[in-house]
Image: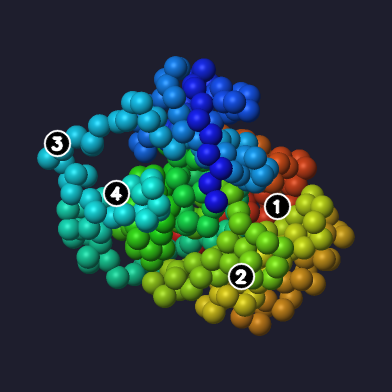
Amino acid sequence: MVRWRSGTVTRVRRRWRGAVELEVRTPDGELRALAYPDLTGEPEPGDRVLLNVGALVMGLGTGGYALVVALPDRLPGDPAQDGTTRDAGHLVKARYTPLQPILLGVDEEASPYRAVMAAADGLDALPVVTADLHSALPAILAGVRAERPDARVAYVMTDGGALPAWFSRTLDGLRGQLAGTVTTGQAFGGDLEASTVHTGLLAARHVLRADVAVVAQGPGNLGTGTTWGFSGVAVGEAVNAVAALGGRPVGSLRVSAGDQRSRHRGVSHHSLTAYGRVALAPADLVLPEELPAELAADVAAAVAPLAERHRLIRVPVAGLDEALRASPVTLSTMGRGLDADHAYFLTAAAAGRHAATLVTG
């Protein structure tokens, strides 16, 4: 259920692409809140706001924010009907929720890319890195850049985590580094909108002209601690989609020496389930050539059964640490930075490096 609050904006704290962070005074005290102006309009000090505070009150993963639902006393007007193709969009996302946006799909009739998408039937051996967590994205990108600095990299964002791409400060910080973001399924707010991972991949290849694509969920991760109850299970489904379209799946394994939860130490059970039981097509599963000895032994034992279906690839790490430290965005996963969970980021960077070696042309 929704936990509602009404409050008054006291200060605009900061902005990034698609989002604005606020301080809001409520009967419970001051709260940090996040608004998406494309959904709610532009909040200003003095505005009354309606808030959803459920995840904040329960301590769940919304970045410590209450979420602005509406500015009830100053509703934004209807989108301008200026004759652009954007007006003709009818792709509904976050469907049948009170804030469902209506968007222009990349393959809709009114899209400028309609003809390209209608003709697109495959990925032409595009290397596609699949990852469990959004935090892997900048590390994968660093690995690609270390091997092939001029490669065009596109991000295909699935809907397992945050639905608005605007929630991600990482994406804001990677502007100019990525060829673009395609939001798929119920996710929205990317440079291009697609209804499925399949059309998102095709858009990455044929519209954004990517040399490498990365598929991962947005920020946040749903998990219950059970074998099947986690949003990252979609990684295996992404491998199948890449293979069905004639791409080259490259699996970024979730490896950690810093996570205190036993199910995520070494190789996370998320990776073992997604690649071992959900992915029906073979992928290149990448490991760094150098890991601390004890961790390396644990990882080798965990991934050995995956070799029955997949190709285990060991990638040299020379230069990857430097590439990770040069990332234009802060590297962080589950609150741990690069030095606190070096193996996690190094493994993601190795997957990026391997994908870059598969680029043709």
Q: CA distance from mark 1 to mark 3?
A: 47 Å
Looking at the image, is 46 positioned above or below residue 70?
A: above
> How far across and how far down the image is residue 269, in percent?
71, 66
Q: Is residue 244 visible?
A: yes
> In whole angstroms, how far apart are the C-alphas of marks 1 and 2?
17 Å
Q: Are marks 4 and 3 in contact (CB under 8 Å)?
A: no
Residue 223, relative to residue 20: is it above or below?
Answer: below
Q: Position of residue 149 (x, y in %)?
A: 49, 44
Dot 4 or dot 2, earlier in sequence? 4
Q: Which mark is residue 344?
A: 1
Label 1 secondary element: helix
Depth order, front residue of 21/95 = 95
Q: Dot 3 surroundings within 10 Å: few (below 14), some, or many (20 or more)?
A: few
- The earlier-in-sequence mark between 1 and 4 is 4
Say which amino acid is labelled 2: Ala
* Front-lying residue, 98 or 225: 98
Residue carrying label 4: 102
Whether 67 is drawn above or below 182: the answer is above
Q: Residue at x 22, y 58 (%)?
A: 108
